[in-house]
Image (cartoon, rainbow, N blue to C red):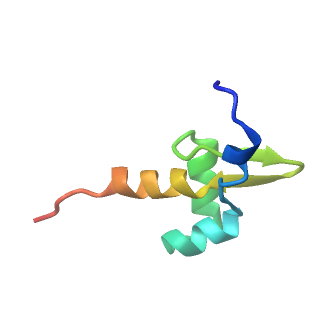
Amino acid sequence: MAANSSSDISEVKFLTIAEVAAMMRVSKMTVYRLVHGGDLPAHRVGRSFRVQEKDVTEYIQRSFYDAG
């Protein structure tokens, strides 16, 4: 893992599981399944999880497919 400078980490936006669920319009349990399944990277802070906003955006982009 590469070392980050303090200016880099201050620009990272972390979201709670509830915020990710609202952003994706799914339940919190669905987000927990994605995190525990390794599909969505998350960081443990105490007893809760935080997800980087960029990881959520990347996951959503990877999940799109052409149904037509």
Residue farthest to the left? 68
Residue 55 percent coordinates (x, y) = 53, 50
16 lies above or below 5 = below
Residue farthest to the right? 46
24 lies above or below 36 = below
Residue 2 percent coordinates (x, y) = 64, 25
Residue drawn at x 57%, y 41% as measured from the top left: 37
Q: How many marks?
A: 0
Residue 29 percent coordinates (x, y) = 64, 62
Residue drawn at x 41%, y 58% as measured from the top left: 60
Q: Does residue 63 appear to the left or right of 54 in the view shown?
A: left
Residue 48 percent coordinates (x, y) = 81, 54
Quadrant in which residue 64 is drawn: bottom left
8 lies above or below 22 = above
Residue farthest to the top? 1
Which quadrant is home to the C terminus? bottom left
Residue drawn at x 52%, y 54% as measured from the top left: 54
Which quadrant is home to the N terminus? top right
Quadrant in which residue 19 is drawn: bottom right
Q: Does residue 42 appear to the left or right of 58 in the view shown?
A: right
Residue drawn at x 16%, y 63% as measured from the top left: 67
Depth check: 44 or 3 in front? 3
